[in-house]
Image (tube, rainbow, N blue to C red):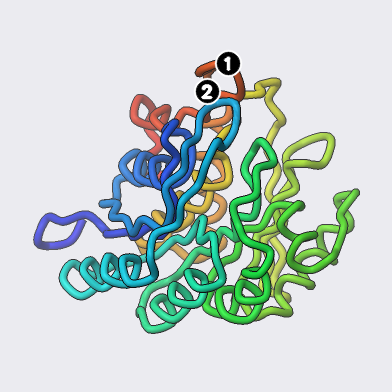
Amino acid sequence: MSASGAPPRVLTVAGSDSGGGAGIQADLKTMLALGVHGMSVLTAVTAQNSLGVQGAWELPVAAVRAQYRSVVDDIGVQAVKTGMLASAELVQVVAELIAGTDAPVVVDPVGVSKHGDPLLAASALDSVRTKLLPAATVATPNLDEVAQLTGVQVESEEQLRDAAAAVLAYGPRWVLVKGGHLPGDAVDLLTDGAEEHWLRAPRYDNRHTHGTGCTLASAIAAQLAKGRSVPEAVTAAKRYVTGAIAAGFALGAGIGPVDHGWALTSDTREA
């Protein structure tokens, strides 16, 4: 908390999930749970529920730019998180905006939804590689996104190093390769090419994991906004999202969301 009484401010640049489990909605819930002030730049609107994405409509570049400038120029930010950017044009303008902002940036290179629905145009992949990733303090790809961006296929824990090296080659300062799709414990690798931090958590028998990636990236941004180092922020965020997965609940007829609010009833705001 600053001397003026305002909490740290975090800006999410992402799409809307009408079902409330992922996207902007997950980001803002996570930020509230972790004691920071969440703000948003909407990049796209989706018609989405527990069964999948039924439609997606991106916002004009001018609208995205105006939202960003409105927030950053007046309120200011201590961290930025990016999620669904949909098109090459949106990737390019967001990369330009965050490169000119003096705050750590967490890039979640969202490519597909939990249900396998595409959320990034194929034509935007090169812009993610050459414009967005170089502006990232931390990039947080899952294994599908690693394969989409680099061509590296990961089938074992040992191959997480290869995946991390391939992503780091595009220029982010740190990469967190999420190994949640591998069997066994949920193992992630955080590295800057010199340091390595292996993060392990038990795998819960719970299929309701919608919004996991958005939640983790937003939790990292929240911790960075509090002044924590990247390894400290990622470790704390991993603890938070592990608890959210454990508390995930059924919603609708498909995959339910993680419980972003579990920390509000536990002593984890500073965890």
The residue identified by callout 1 is: 253
Question: Do tag 2 and tag 1 residues touch (Cβ < 8 Å)?
Answer: no
Query: Which-is-in-front pick, marks 2 and 1?
Result: 1
Along the viewing direction, whichever of 126 and 239 lies nearer the viewer: 126
Residue 198 seen in the figure: no
Question: Amino acid type of disc 2?
Answer: Ala
The residue identified by callout 2 is: 247
The x and y percentages for residue 23 are 46, 45
Rendered residue at 65%/49% (across/down): 118
Question: Amino acid type of disc 1?
Answer: Ala
When the figure is inspected, residue 167 is found, relative to residue 116, above or below; the finding is below
The x and y percentages for residue 255 are 60, 24
Residue 63 seen in the figure: yes
Rendered residue at 37%/74% (across/down): 103
Q: Is residue 91 left or right of residue 187?
A: left
Along the viewing direction, whichever of 181 and 193 lies nearer the viewer: 181
* Badge 2 or badge 1: first in the primary sequence: 2
Rendered residue at 39%/30% (across/down): 261
